[in-house]
Amino acid sequence: MKLNKTYYKNSDETVYSTKLSNGLNVFLIPKPEYSETAAVFATKFGSLESNAILKLNGNTIKGKLGVAHFLEHRMFDNPKGPVFDLFSNLGAISNAFTSFDKTAYYFVASNKLESNTELLLDFVQGLEIKKESVEKEKGIIIEELKMYLDMPESRLGRGILENMYINHPIKHDIGGTIEEVASTSLEVLQACHQTFYHPNNMVLVIVGQMKVDSLIKVIEKNQNAKTLKPQLKPVFAKVSEPLIVKFKYRQIQMPISTKKIAIGYKLKPIDKLTNIQINKRLIAYSIYQDMLFSESAPFYQNLIKSKIITPTMDVSAFQGAGYNAMIIESEVLDEAKFIKAIDDQIKNANVGLMEKEFQIVKNLNVSEAIRSYESPQRLAINYMSNYFDGVNVFDDLESIKNITLKDIVKVASEIRQTKKSVFVIKPMVKN
Amino acid sequence: LKVIKKRLKNNVDLKIIPTTKFKTLVLNIGFKGPYKQKDITGLYLLSKIMADSSKKYPKAELLARQQDYLYGTAIQVSSQLVGELSLFSLTVSILDPKLISSKFKLLEKAIALIVELIYRPNIVNGLFDQQLFETTKSNHMYRLKSLDNDKESVAAIRMKELVDDSHPYQQLSLGNLKDLSTITNQDLIKLYKELLDREIEIYVLGDVLSKNIVTTIEKKFKAKAVNKKIKTIIPLKQTKVKKIIETRKFNQSYLSYLLTVNTLVGDKDYYPMIMFNAIFGRTPLSKLFRVVREKNSLCYSISSSYQVNYGFINVGAGIDAKNYKKADSLIRQQLTLMKQGSFTQEDINMNRNMLVTMIEHTYDQPVGLVNQLVTSDLIKADTIKQDYIDNLNKVTKAQIIKAAKKVEVKIEYLLKQGDKNETK
């Protein structure tokens, strides 16, 4: 097996990588001065794949909303005992998360790295659960969904996506709905595992204290010893998503003290770009947001001074297969003025003349990129997530350097042409 | 990891933690002093005002822009309460200058900015800029009101109110709406002046030894030589047993407890109590997590936390109201089982491993590490990682049982989901 070594001078990091014969891509990033190591083993399977039609033992099985998240929960039930315990026996802390398009399992350990790595591979690749265990988990997941229902921020994020998307599964909650969770079966979990947890669809990233040579041997030996079931090919219902939004404006009520608002811009998906192009675009969005809406933008501070918002505004952009959006969220004191101010800023800000702001925001982005390499856990998760998005985190610094004000002007004009949606949570009148 | 301690000629207590492992340098400047209850809200407001502007950067956007320009130099100003001590601090994280051009002089510029924020605040004619003061005050009002949106905050605040003893635990470092409404610009000026008369302790972490950091700090900061002992370790007394149920308009209920443990940091039972808390409810391997969540599916979130300098444990769980009786009896049952020694050596080992990994994790993060050292030092807990680990390793099962027997449920508070708000 050939281990490739790449040194990234800008960030002073070295990555060892290889593709094992079963298709698994492995990335090792040593940090000799750290005591801890973080490892993440992830699959490109998230809530967006919940609508897949699967075939298991000749039967057709329809996916369930929230099934990726359900499976993540249930992977922690292992015939050898609860997975948290198995890791803890080896001195590691483990956890997992499900996003729109990924499920990731990870641990942080300060010793017994090789045994912990084997445990991570084994528990994620083996699904041996019983029907009762599936039933039992439903109560826990339903309480989790109810917890989110009481969290205004979570409702706001959910609500704006429901507003913007008509057909795309991104309009659904990652955890699904209480009804769908309650009717999730063992079979659908098994089918998803056999389909999406194949090494071809997964990646392993390890960052921190390690001996590269012996670690990679352990990983290779572990993988070669496994006979995996053939990968099932899912069929996805074709989704066509128009560029218009479902609701231009919608509001709900919650027992909160101050009104909350989200404004979403529905951008064209950027599926057909090269890795470097995607990376550059994502950074261009981030710089655009910082220039126009961050704390260093007079625009933001004026909104606070004029009592239009409280200092809670946050702008984020995200993209993936078939979706791409920029969302502005805030607590708002004067809704109409806020919507108008955002409209005006997007329409009128002359980005092309903001050379000085552009250079300063570039400094900020350089530092954010470098700092994101600092924590083993954060780097492992970022590296994995970017890998699935077709991007290498260590290219960030190069991309930032190469970005010009023209790129930002392009982003600005693109956002100007998109359809907007507004979602508002109004305080309920108290009893 | 070693900490170099120096008492400088300008009376600053300096602690340097030299390391090359991070890409960040961290400076933590702590002003330590006593506080009066009526000053808490003002200290919090002051922290916001000082983090937002200065003489040279009178507008928030100008200061933020300077921070962006200094490669995202992050400055967090905070006002915390530890027992009878108020810790007002600036935590600054700076990109390690060796990662960018040395001509930029990042460290020098960042220190100049910190000095500007501390010694040249945005004061005009003896008062903080009036608009800044008004805006900060009104924003803080919204912040305090928003605590009502979150059931964990509501439960935490109600728990503080339910305690009989008058104790620093009852104070919220954010202050309260009542004090906020009467606070004046003059009050903040007075607090700012008192701040400059406090003891100063500065932590510096990172690759700084070659950078004349001692001379710079000696030149740029000045502190009064006060060495008052302020109590940070104060046991909370709660003799009455209480059970309170209140209803709020939420979709889920929140069940919480206050347990006195009669053990403080530094006591003989301190490490056994840390182990008790871990096995009882702190970790995902704990009894509460396994039994209430995993076995009985009654909740998603459940955990316990040990306030080591106040001597009590808080337990909290998000549940459905219909499961209240069952959850309550299971939680109490786990405590009884702990007292009876119904846990294994494996439980001890696993939970101990988890605590060790948690501390290693904290020590591998620059800001986390500095915060850990600052707090541990204040409450006289072990600051050397290996001491902490060695002490955990010495704890025996018999000691944990003995510790468990000191634990008593004193307050139970259920915030029940419902259609309307009812407070008893």
Image (cartoon, coloured by chain):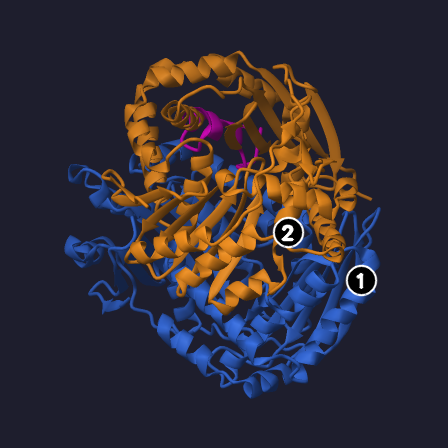
Chain colours: A orange, B blue
Q: Chain of mark 1?
A: B
Percent from the top left, x then y, of residue B380? 41, 75
Q: Nearer the viewer, residue B182 or B24?
A: B24
Percent from the top left, x then y, of residue A424? 68, 29
Q: Is residue B118 left or right of residue A197?
A: left
Numbered disc 1: secondary structure: helix
Say which amino acid is labelled 2.
Answer: His
Q: Is the residue under label 1 in contact with that under label 2 (CB below 8 Å)?
A: no
Q: Is residue B24 left or right of residue A345?
A: left
In the picture, the disc for residue A106 is: none
Q: Nearer the viewer, residue A254 or A17?
A: A17
Say which amino acid is labelled 1.
Answer: Tyr
Whether residue A356 is visible, yes or no, is yes
Residue A297 within the magenta-colored segment of the rendering: yes
In the picture, the disc for residue B324 is: 1
Front tag of 2 and 1: 2
Q: Work out which quarter of the rendered image holds the N terminus of chain B and state it.
A: bottom left
Residue A193 vertical position relative to residue B291 in the rendered view, above or below: above
Q: Work out which quarter of the rendered image holds the C terminus of chain B and state it.
A: bottom right
Percent from the top left, x then y, of residue B400? 57, 83
Whether labels 2 and 1 share one chain? no
Q: Residue at x 38, y 35 (%)?
A: B64
Q: Is residue A37 left or right of residue A139?
A: left
Numbered disc 2: secondary structure: helix
Residue B330 within the magenta-colored segment of the rendering: no
Magenta residues span A290-313
The residue carrying mark 2 is A73
**How many other residues sit within 10 Å of disc 2, few (<14), some (14-19) or many (≥20)?**
some
**How many other residues sit within 10 Å of disc 1, few (<14), some (14-19) or many (≥20)?**
some
Q: Residue at x 38, y 65 (%)?
A: B373
| Alpha carbons under labels 2 and 1: distance apart | 24 Å
